[in-house]
Amino acid sequence: AVRLAGVDTPRKGEKGYAEARNALQALIGGKEVTIEMVATGAYGRSIANVKHRGYLVNEAMKKHGK
């Protein structure tokens, strides 16, 4: 699993998790993406920029508040 750099999303079970998951699924579900690793988080999670067809998915998620 990869966390989107610069995007603060709720964890599983928290309010808003399903909405954020569904928004991301609508953007890139089943599509080919490019992952650019940025860092490793405090809990060993990969933090990355994710791109699809030239647009930064991280920014799309922030723009829509998901």
Image (cartoon, grey):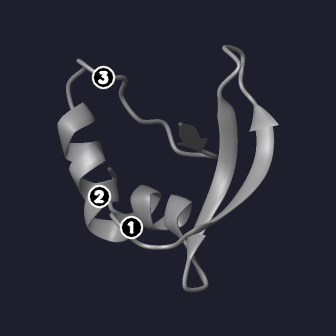
Q: Which residue is mark 2?
A: 25
Instruction: Give the number of the disc on residue 28.
Output: 1
Q: Is residue 42 left or right of residue 65?
A: right
Q: Secondary structure at mark 3?
A: loop
Q: Which residue is mark 3?
A: 12
Q: Is residue 47 above or below residue 28?
A: above
Q: What amino acid is at disc 3? A: Lys
Q: Is residue 2 above or below residue 23?
A: above
Q: Secondary structure at mark 1?
A: helix
**Which residue is depicted at the point 22% across and 51% down?**
22
Q: What amino acid is at disc 1? A: Ile
Q: Earlier in the sequence, mark 2 or mark 3?
A: 3
Q: Quadrant of residue 24?
A: bottom left
Residue 14 in the image: state x and y as whole percent: 25, 20
Real-space Cα separation, disc 2 to disc 3, in angstroms: 15 Å
Q: Is residue 28 above or below residue 13?
A: below
Q: Quadrant of residue 27?
A: bottom left
**Which residue is depicted at the point 19% across and 38% down?**
18
Instruction: Return the residue found at the far top.
Output: 43
Q: Is residue 43 left or right of residue 39?
A: left
Residue 50 in the image: state x and y as whole percent: 60, 61
Q: Are marks 2 and 1 in contact (CB under 8 Å)?
A: yes
